[in-house]
Image (cartoon, helix red, strand yellow):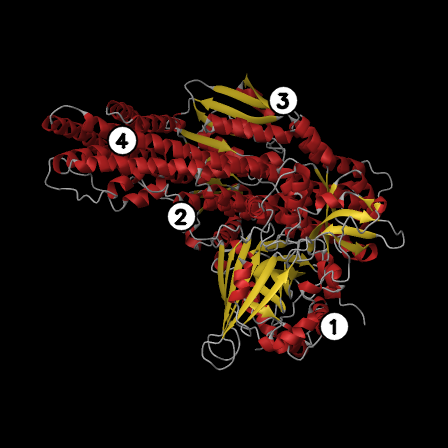
Amino acid sequence: MFDDLLSALEPGEENLFAADTDGDSIADTFIVEHNIDTNGDGMADIVVTETFVDLDHDSQPGYYSITEETDTDGDGLLDHTVFLEDTDGDSFFDMIAEWDVGEYDMSDMESLEQLEASDAEAYSEFGHFAPTDVDMDGIIGTPFESLDSWHVQSDNTCAVVSQEFVLENLLDREFDEGELRAIAEEHGWYDNGTSMEDVGKLLEYYGVDVEQSTENTLDDLRSSLLENNQIIVCLDADEIWSGQNEEMFGPGMDANHTVQVIGMDESNPDDVKIIINDSGVTNGQGVMVPADLFVDAWEDSGCFMLEASCATILEAQQG
Amino acid sequence: MPDLFVLKKDTAECFQEGAALARRLGFNAAAKTIAETEKDFLEKKLMVVTVGEMKRGKSSMLNALLGEKEQIFPVNASVATNAITIVRYGEEEKVEVVTEERKKGIMLPTTKTIHRTEIPNYVSEQGNPSNFKNVRLLKVEIPNPLLKEGIVFVDTPGVGSLNISHAETTYGFLPNADLLLFVSDASSGLTETELNFLKRGYKYCKNVLFPLTKKDTNPRYKEIMEDNQYKISAALGISIDEVTLIPISNTAKIRYLETQSKAALASSNFPEFERLMWSTIAAKRGEIMFLPFLEQVRQETFKIDENIVAQYQLLESNKEKMLELIANLKKEIEKYKSFESTNLQWKSELAESFAIMQNNNIAALSSMELEATNHLEDRITALGVKICEPEYYKQVYNEINNIMSERLLELKDQMIDKTVEEVNRVNISLGLNVDSCQRALDGLNFTPKKDLDVVFPKRKASEDAIRKGTKISRSIVGGSKIGMVIGGLLGAALAVFAGPAVIAAELGTTVADAIFYTAISSSMTGTSIGGFLGGAKGCVDAVTQGRDVDIPVVRKALTNHINESRILLTKIMNEGMITLKGRVINSFETEFTAKKRELEDNIKQIEITVNSTKPDQEKLEELKRNAETIQKYMVRLEELKDTVASLNNTEQDSVFQGNTGDIPVSTLVPEAEKKEMEYSFL
Amino acid sequence: MEQSRMKEVIHTFNHSELCRKLIPAELASGWPCLKKVRGKLYIVIPYFNRMPVKSGYALYPIYCSATIPWKMPEKMLDFTVYTIQENWKDVDYSKPVGFFKHKALEDIRTKDEYIALCNRLYRCYDEMVLAVLENKPFAGEEKMAGLFSKLMEPSLYPFYEKINKKFYSNFYKM
């Protein structure tokens, strides 16, 4: 299917990006950008971007989206956007949105990029956990078993998705982000995001025992991992993504992100790393974050930690 | 004027016949509704609730009003207890006291019959200090002819500024009041607490009389009267002319009862007050005690009539359409089934609203905590070390409790409004406000014929308006019931109103509701509430027995009290909201079942006509006969309604009415002493 | 330079237990306004959703606000969720209303410059609060209006205006 796509592209008009997001050396995510010049002034006045994601390599996209940006008034700025998305690969669009760009001025692009690191740069300096690369004796927790459940969140759903990862690990079956989000919305645990208080409610909904705590330390994290607990933490995403310490908008709303901690790497005691599954960025699977940076970002949430225990689940299954 | 007792008997009989008629014609769901309406009708009382601050002379006024030789309500008691007194008609005098005792951790009501002279032993501060006997309710039945028409007097504890428990007990009654007697007295002006209370009461009951007692104790009572009049009109946002205060003297009236002195009677001004009160009651009783029930039964028979007429007209002119009608009715049934199984959006919307409400509650309770803390700090600043003296400490402690209860009551009002709004929204979005049989018929595209023997009944344009105003809430979905549930919930939250089950049962609410109250109150009167009050009392004790108490200790004790109260109330609210949500959802499901039954009845009757082997002519005659019977019955209902309406035309010298708009915020907040800067941005 | 007290107050509330309970962690807090209730000074902090996009942030309508006492920033007087308010019912929360940064900030090239500018505005707030607390005229009104008008996101302004027209329109001169 993608070969067909590639051959259909005409040079100069389209750009194709291919990426391997799950680390199996086979490209699974393709972004095709079509630049269409309808009035022949040499400037693209419609830009169509298609995104295909095919993680299971069956040539059928599990995710497909089209973004169509149009310059409606001919001033050279793309001022209207239509966005269509098929999130479950059933070939029907699940979401269609449309908006005018309004105040947004494309000429700001350059300076804006200085203001905020883009997604692609996040974690670019850090390693990603791979069992072959590390000394397993120095690894605390079972990060390898937790890698598979990772995927990118679709909205402000980091808390929902982190809980999804935990549920999949504990209950050993697949959960759907959309369904979990619907449950959370129904119970008031998700509305434009999740308050820290409500992190863990979805786990409780599925009968998992959880414990919230703050003022934790790396030692607490370590002992919890040793007890085979599943762990979710809240932290400042800007800090771990780009080292930016200050929140752009009002002060203090900096614990803006939720990730799953899947292990620690203590093979080099001078360079301890925390292994996380971060659904917020495309290369957030099994990221190994230096401990000091992690703690800095974590402190913004008062070192909030949610522990979900395996023991009760096992009991429940046996019982 | 028609005899009310005869009218009541006639109406009840008419309802019985209606139920029998519906059953005979095969409309069992309607028969059941009519029978239930009759039951509610017979139990309906007109409730006159007296409210007002302690020591305003409420109890004396009731004694004087009832004109009993021996006074019922103890008046020389210093402070009344938490108990509510309910006085109603009985052939023989009977006084019962309901106390609550803890059995296996649950508070259970116990009723004991006592003699009238023993009353002070239970409801006065002397006889029952701090209500250690746990008295919740005093039920008095007397053969007083004034009460014979189903009028019930309720005497509530004062809305004192010093006692949350009294206030909440009284607030719990408001949704049931048909007439409020708001008592103030001539010795001192109305306080803000009293006015706030009045605003709340006015929301539920627009019939208010304002007796001003103790007119004999203050020769310049007119000044107080005018001041009160002004304050009331400002608080309720109504014109000053609409507020009629009636100065009375209870002692003069009682002196008259003892001595028959005409001068004493005239000086009491009771004749004027009684005339006003009884004429208000007379004017309202038809509206409150008859019309809603007559209307309910009329609606049921209307639907039966419509079904029979539809059968007749279709059989006569367009037989095929009968099958289509059955199909339409079945579609309606499917719709209700889908609400129960597949189309669950209404449920999740409700759940979402409740979740948001819960968040608002958390925020409101935090705000309550803040206000109480602010107050504490202000008082510490003002009082300095004096706050460590038991007397001042207790006062501040009470003030804090008062602030918290005031906010809690505001929150309750918000919750009630929001829940009612939600329920109405779901009602409309699911189309429950529309008659589904009518909808099925409308869907036929069939033009009714006016030249046939049997024609469709006419709908009155005014009908919807009447229905809106007088519909009885048959389920929790009704606004006043929600008010009671939430009221009960918060009453229980304050621990002192631990008897909502008792009172709910007393007011003739359904058994299910009473069970619900019990469930809530027992869950809350357990350990947590004990902790709440126990802890608070502990604080008081710590200071009153205080050894070397200083400001930091006081601050800590009271801050802890405020904080613990907030935490506990949050917990109670959260749990209560879950229960309330369950109840609302459950009541919708019950409604679906009822609607389905009604539709099934309709289908069955049409099928009987369709499948019967009788010749069409015979069928038509039978339908015509049935239609005539039911229409004759409807005429009778109309006649009864007319008779009841004539009750209302009797002397009506009522109070003020109308003005249902939002009550503006009181303008009585005193201006700050210091002149404040004016800013362009504040 | 000394940290702004206003910034500190907001920071404290945003780190408080209440905020964690009630406000989705992913939201950002916006420009506060002052409010006097029963003689005490409060600040109202609005919250909105913003999503990083390729080149900045997509901004969504204001979602809720918290009213907190100036002197006790861990407590709260009021919490309002606008999505459920009657006069906000036409607001569409599903799509962005605009993008950051807006035109007025064209000359601001780096994040540090931007933060410095914000800090200047916060210090204006401090001066204003001080004036109100001491019951004195606020001298820095014009300076504040200049900074405020530059920093206020035009696409979000209509929502600010809905929250407190008197305050925000006094400083937003566009």
Residue topped by disc 3? B101
Q: How many marks?
A: 4
- Left or right of residue B378, residue B309 in this image: left
In the displayed structure, B124 sits above or below A218; it is above
Look at label 4 and name its amino acid: Ile
Q: Residues within 10 Å of mark 2 (few under 14, many from 20)?
A: some
Residue topped by disc 4? B603
Select label 4 or label 3 by which is in front.
Answer: 4
* Distance from the alpha carbon under mark 4 to that under mark 2: 49 Å
- In the rendered image, residues at marks 1 and 4 fall on the same chain: no
* Distance from the alpha carbon under mark 2 to that under mark 3: 43 Å
Question: Does the CB distance between marks 1 and 2 fall below 8 Å?
Answer: no
**Chain ID of residue with mark 1:** C
* Distance from the alpha carbon under mark 1 to that under mark 3: 69 Å
Residue B438's image quarter? top left
Look at label 2 and name its amino acid: Phe
Q: Position of residue C114 (x, y in %)?
A: 70, 73
Q: Position of residue B352 (x, y in %)?
A: 53, 46
Residue topped by disc 2? B656
Q: Position of residue B143 (x, y in %)?
A: 42, 22
Q: Nearer the viewer, residue C86 or B283?
A: C86
Look at label 1 and name its amino acid: Asp
Question: Does the CB distance between marks 2 and 3 fall below 8 Å?
Answer: no
Looking at the rendering, in which quadrant would you find the C terminus of chain B? bottom right
